[in-house]
């Protein structure tokens, strides 16, 4: 959060929020020290958004609460919008609408609102309340008589034998059993628009930020949930201000990341929930979980993760939670019944559903609904046996992206990355696939990905195929006849590399920080090094496609499923790589293969 904005809101370093317990719809006392209610929940949400500690300054009436903000004894407050108050307080748009009603005795001749404003009629009002200020402007013939607070209106009306009481519908209805023989008039006389406010002296930036905060809380359902949580009836969430809401969304520069829970038979849901439970995750990106809501709930319950989930529909306009909002957005595919999942055992049926989910996410990425796909560990064998007949997920992704040309698996650990000339084929076949075109593809991909990760001048080493780099042709001549000539050609084209180096020394250079990446000739040549040096933080990226895909480099870990032992380190790193590449795409000129 901008430190200047923090200072504008809370010059003391603590956000002091004025709370009016005179309006029980929004706040009430639990005991002598504690208060609860919708406005209290909003106060804590704002403090979290600003990254500030909060102190509640509690008052018994609206007038006192308003004056505290005007006098800067409090920083923000919750008030009904009123022109008089607006002379010194900047209001947001309303977040809650409350109805104002009249109350009379059962035997009163007054039967409608039009009959109230007559000479000789005295109306009890809560001093300084929104409806008091409204009636001061609109009542011409009747007389207003002020009770000390809004909750005291009914008893004040009875004690002074007045003709009419004015108040918030819910408060009057609450007091009716205490004072039988009274009734509400059938129609409301006003709608009270409850908003947040800050002293105008705090500046336009604070006013704008507070307005955006209120619109955000309405749009993500926070206000509605608070009304429901506190069992408030009669009050409704105010409509969104479409202009303000759009401005909030337009100014949010975090990339939109689709998160998939992985194969539910493994540790995927566990590490995904652990990723979501980090505030840094939501500060880095706008996250949309895609999968089965029941699987998510099951994993969240196991982890004690209690953030509310807002389900959205594919293709609809999404209002994203702000970075400090405790809410998860999810597209529920309703495609995996938790009752048929067998933890710790590969299942082709689950493999099919995992592929189905990833295909949906690919379509979302290609339709510009999300910027990248980050998925928790899956089981390659289950996917293949389940009906997705590809060598691996990378070939599957390439097909879905209708990709033509080179692509490949990229393995990333904190020390360095590896890029493959060959991948998931037999070692015998891999040797025959070490050809100039594949070497060129791997080196080109390495330069592109490394630049996307922030290496403007990548240092790339190339591993030899044969022992001792062929020992001058003694142990094989591929380094002489294929690899070195290809590297020389690439260097002449501006794609500089080093090598070929023997594979038993090239990783020592990378570990020492002398190389950013190593281009390897076959799968295990690089995997042994990356697993030994960065197993808990290794990331797999599918490089070269229109869609960004990242996942932890480890598998489903069937031996620890359900034990809450899974380390989320690689899941976090996979997410962060996706964020970096998505941000790079947004700032770079668009290309078909920009990572």
Image: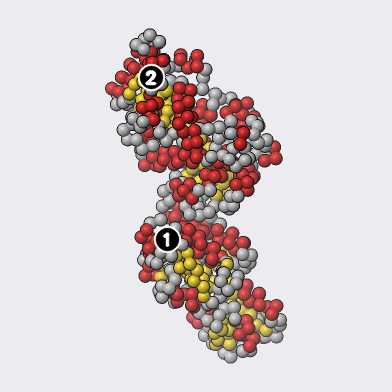
**Residue at left 28%, top 22%?**
492
Q: Which mark is residue 502?
A: 2
- Decide: is 545 above or below 3: above
Residue 233 shows in the view: yes
**Residue at left 56%, top 69%?**
35
Q: Position of residue 478 (x, y in %)?
A: 39, 13
Q: Where is residue 571 in the image (x, y as percent from the top left)?
A: 51, 39
Task: Identify the element where label 2 is drawn.
Answer: loop
Q: How many numbered marks appear? A: 2
341 with respect to 525 (left or right): right
Instruction: Quadrant for the C terminus, please.
Output: top left
- In the image, 66 versus 305, the foreground residue is 305
Point out the frontmost of discs 2 and 1. 2
Q: Quadrant of residue 419?
A: top left
- Decide: is 436 above or below 370: above
Q: How far apart are marks 2 and 1 (CA)?
A: 58 Å
């Amino acid at each position: 959060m901008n430190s200047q904005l923090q200072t504008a809101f809370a010059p003391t370093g603590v956000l002091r929020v004025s709370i009016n317990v005179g309006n029980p719809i929004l706040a009430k006392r639990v005991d002598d020290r504690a208060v609860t209610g919708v406005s209290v929940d909003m106060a804590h949400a704002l403090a979290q958004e600003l990254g500030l500690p909060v102190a509640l300054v509690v008052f018994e009436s609206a007038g006192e609460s308003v004056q505290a903000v005007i006098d800067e004894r409090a920083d923000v407050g919750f008030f009904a919008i009123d022109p008089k108050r607006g002379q010194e307080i900047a209001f947001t748009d309303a977040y809650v609408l409350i109805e104002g009603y009249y109350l009379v005795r059962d035997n009163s001749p007054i039967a409608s609102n039009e009959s109230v404003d007559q000479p000789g009629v005295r109306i009890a009002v809560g001093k300084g309340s929104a409806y008091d200020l409204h009636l001061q402007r609109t009542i011409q013939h009747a007389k207003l008589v002020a009770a000390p607070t809004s909750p005291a209106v009914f008893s004040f009306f009875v004690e002074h034998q007045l003709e009419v009481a004015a108040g918030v519908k819910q408060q009057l209805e609450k007091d009716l059993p205490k004072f039988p023989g009274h009734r509400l008039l059938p129609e409301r006389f006003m709608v009270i628009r409850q908003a947040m406010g800050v002293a105008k002296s705090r500046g336009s930036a604070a006013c704008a930020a507070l307005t955006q905060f209120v619109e955000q809380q309405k749009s993500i359902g926070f206000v509605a949930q608070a009304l429901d949580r506190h069992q408030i009836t009669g009050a409704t969430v105010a409509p969104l201000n479409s202009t303000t809401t759009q401005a909030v969304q337009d100014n949010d520069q975090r990339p939109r990341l689709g998160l998939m829970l992985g194969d539910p038979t493994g540790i995927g849901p566990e590490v995904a929930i652990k990723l979501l439970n980090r505030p840094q995750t939501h500060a880095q990106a706008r996250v949309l979980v895609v999968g089965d809501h029941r699987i998510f709930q099951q994993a969240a319950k196991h982890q004690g993760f209690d953030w509310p989930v807002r389900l959205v529909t594919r293709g609809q306009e999404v209002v994203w939670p702000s970075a400090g909002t405790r809410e998860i957005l999810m597209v529920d595919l309703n495609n995996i019944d938790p009752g048929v999942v067998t933890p710790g055992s590969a299942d082709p049926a689950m493999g099919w559903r995992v592929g189905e989910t990833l295909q949906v996410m690919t379509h979302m990425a290609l339709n510009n609904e999300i910027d990248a796909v980050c998925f928790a560990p899956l089981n390659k064998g289950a996917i293949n046996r389940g009906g997705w007949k590809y060598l691996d997920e990378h070939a599957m992704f390439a097909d879905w992206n209708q990709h033509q040309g080179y692509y490949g698996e990229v393995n990333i650990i904190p020390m360095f990355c590896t890029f493959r000339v060959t991948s998931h084929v037999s070692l015998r076949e891999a040797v025959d696939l070490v050809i100039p075109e594949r070497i060129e593809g791997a080196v080109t991909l390495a330069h592109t990905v490394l630049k996307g990760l922030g290496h403007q001048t990548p240092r790339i080493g190339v591993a030899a195929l044969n022992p001792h780099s062929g020992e001058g042709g003694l142990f094989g001549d591929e380094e002489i006849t294929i690899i070195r000539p290809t590297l020389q050609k690439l260097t002449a084209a501006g794609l500089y590399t080093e090598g070929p180096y023997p594979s038993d020394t090239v990783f020592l250079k990378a570990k020492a920080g002398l190389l950013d990446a190593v281009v390897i000739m076959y799968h295990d040549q690089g995997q042994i090094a990356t697993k030994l040096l960065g197993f808990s933080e290794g990331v797999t990226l599918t490089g070269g496609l229109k869609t960004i895909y990242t996942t932890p480099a480890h598998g489903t870990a069937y031996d620890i499923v359900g034990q809450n032992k899974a380390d989320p380190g690689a899941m976090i790193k996979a997410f962060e790589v996706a964020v970096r590449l998505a941000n790079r795409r947004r700032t770079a000129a668009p290309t078909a293969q920009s990572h």
